[in-house]
């Protein structure tokens, strides 16, 4: 698959996932906002109804008190003498007087309505017509009296109610009942807490679980007795401890879909990363195979030519020529060995753990062997390689092949990244530290490494920029291989470098004393 195709699919999927998540979050936000608005509207509607009920209770209380006072003023303390129904007296032409109540009059009128000729009031007998008109006047007077009484109650409400303490105006038991009933009528069937606030902002009464420190965003307020003067108005505050649960109930079904979408996004991201890594690894392997094909051809053809020359009888008569050809075969064999080791390094990264064949060896002897082999390559570039290897025993448990490759890689990098204007100089030293570890230092005077790159040089596939130099080939696996092998040997490796001055790689391995 082409890289451009992978990028196109990646961008398409990213845009799709982002759009899907954005749509889900916007829908959830709209649902929460709509649910919150419905909740606020239901609460405010309930509080307004409670406020109205409290006003009606207060008006009824004042009206009752006014009627009692009026009755006491007209009839004294003997309330049993009060005539509940008004009476009507009619004087007949013969001088006799008939008295009856309003209810008895209604019954007589109803009885008279059965006579067809008396249906029309204008056709009533004069005495009945006079009684009917007198009854209308009496009802009118009674209406005016009751209206005056109510007006008096209203005046008392306006003048006296606002001055009374709020706890004298509100029955707290009824208040809790009103709130519960109205909230249930509006579908708010969950716990609530409330408090009465006086005109000075002080809490004068609150429910048992009321918390004064609750956030203002959760409080709902309603002015009770709104007809009071502005400076004497009291308020009712309510909040619902489980309000957030109620709001989130409407969007709970969206949360699993968002989680599944995020899981898909993470899975897709991981898949894309793996695809890119595999793509990069595939390209590198293809380049590696092409380079290996070329690298193998040269030494193989050289060895083949040298072998043919050895078959010539003339060559056996010239010891110098024979020795030269043998040296060529030996050098090309080593070259082939290094190429095979690079292939081995490539395959190692496909395994979780390297299979090591550990043997106890003297690290100084092993380094001396590597130096003797690598010295020819260093001298080819006009450089020198020196060492400081103490005579004391430094026994370590290592896999000889892999550890030899580690030293070869570090020395080979020093040759690759040398400075053209300065003769190459390599130096290897060993020493014992902390009585249980051996430290191996490999230093060069090459181009050095930037501080920003020092943190990444042991990462897989990472390569340090070499500026305009194009003769340094590689795949960013050499130092990653070195790091992996040292860690598998329970050791440690670090690098110290200064740009244009050189680099030092320091390896630490556990020492075997016995």
Image (spheres, rainbow, N blue to C red):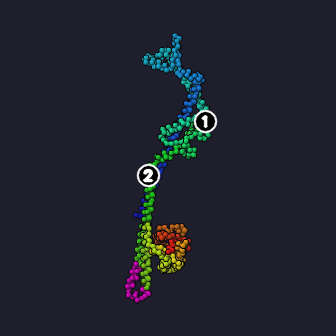
Residue at figure coordinates x 57%, y 22% from the top left: 78
Instruction: Label 1: state its secondary structure.
Output: loop
In which quarter of the view is residue 8 placed?
A: bottom left
- Residue 313 in magenta stretch: yes
Against 122, is 322 above or below? Answer: below
Q: Position of residue 386 (x, y in %)?
A: 53, 79
Tag of residue 165: 1
Return the residue nearer the eye: 444 or 103: 103
Disc 2 target residue = 257
Residue 2 in view here: yes
Mark 1, Cα crowd under 10 Å, few <14 / some 14-19 / many 20+, is some
Q: Which residues are magenta?
A: 300-322
Return the residue nearer the eye: 310 or 406: 406
In which quarter of the view is residue 399 placed?
A: bottom left
Return the residue nearer the eye: 14 or 354: 354
Against 178, is 81 above or below? Answer: above
């Amino acid at each position: 698959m082409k890289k451009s195709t992978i990028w196109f699919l990646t961008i398409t999927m990213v845009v799709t996932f982002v759009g899907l998540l954005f749509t889900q979050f916007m829908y959830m936000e709209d649902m929460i906002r709509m649910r919150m608005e419905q909740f606020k509207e239901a609460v405010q509607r309930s509080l307004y109804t409670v406020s109205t009920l409290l006003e009606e209770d207060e008006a009824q209380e004042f009206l009752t008190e006014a009627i009692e006072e009026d009755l006491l003023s007209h009839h004294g303390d003997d309330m049993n003498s009060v005539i509940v129904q008004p009476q009507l007296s009619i004087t007949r032409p013969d001088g006799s007087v008939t008295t009856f109540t309003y209810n008895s009059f209604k019954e007589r009128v109803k009885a008279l309505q059965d006579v067809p000729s008396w249906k029309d009031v204008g056709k009533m007998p004069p005495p009945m017509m006079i009684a009917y008109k007198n009854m209308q006047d009496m009802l009118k007077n009674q209406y005016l009296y009751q209206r005056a009484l109510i007006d008096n109650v209203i005046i008392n409400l306006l003048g006296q109610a606002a001055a009374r303490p709020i706890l004298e105006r509100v029955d707290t038991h009824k208040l809790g009942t009103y709130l519960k009933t109205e909230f249930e009528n509006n579908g708010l069937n969950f716990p609530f807490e409330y408090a009465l606030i006086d005109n000075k902002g002080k809490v004068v009464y609150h429910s048992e679980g009321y918390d004064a420190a609750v956030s203002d965003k959760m409080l709902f307020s309603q002015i009770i007795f709104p007809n009071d003067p502005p400076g004497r108005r009291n308020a009712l505050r309510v909040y619902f401890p489980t309000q957030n649960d109620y709001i989130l109930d409407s969007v709970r079904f969206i949360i699993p879909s968002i989680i599944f979408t995020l899981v898909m996004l993470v899975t897709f991201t991981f898949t894309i990363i793996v695809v890119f890594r595999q793509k990069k690894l595939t390209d590198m392997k293809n380049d590696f195979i092409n380079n290996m094909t070329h690298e193998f051809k040269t030494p193989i053809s050289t060895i083949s030519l040298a072998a043919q020359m050895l078959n010539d009888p003339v060559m056996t008569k010239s010891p110098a020529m024979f020795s030269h050809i043998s040296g060529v075969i030996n050098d090309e064999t080593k070259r082939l060995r290094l190429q095979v080791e690079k292939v081995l390094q490539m395959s190692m990264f496909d395994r979780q753990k390297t299979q090591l064949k550990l043997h106890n060896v003297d690290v100084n002897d092993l380094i001396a062997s590597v130096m003797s082999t690598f010295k020819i390559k260093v001298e080819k570039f006009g450089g020198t390689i020196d060492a400081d290897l103490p005579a004391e025993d430094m026994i370590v448990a290592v896999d000889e092949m892999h550890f030899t490759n580690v030293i070869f890689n570090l020395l080979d990098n020093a040759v690759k990244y040398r400075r053209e204007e300065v003769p190459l100089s390599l130096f290897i030293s060993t020493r014992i530290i902390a009585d249980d570890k051996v430290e191996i230092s490999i230093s060069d005077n090459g181009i050095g490494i930037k501080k920003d790159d020092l943190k990444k040089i042991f990462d897989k596939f990472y390569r340090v920029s070499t500026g305009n130099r194009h003769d340094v080939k590689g795949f960013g696996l050499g130092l990653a291989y070195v790091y992996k092998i040292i860690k598998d040997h329970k050791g440690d490796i670090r690098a110290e470098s200064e740009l244009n001055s050189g680099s030092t790689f320091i390896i630490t391995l556990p020492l075997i004393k016995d």
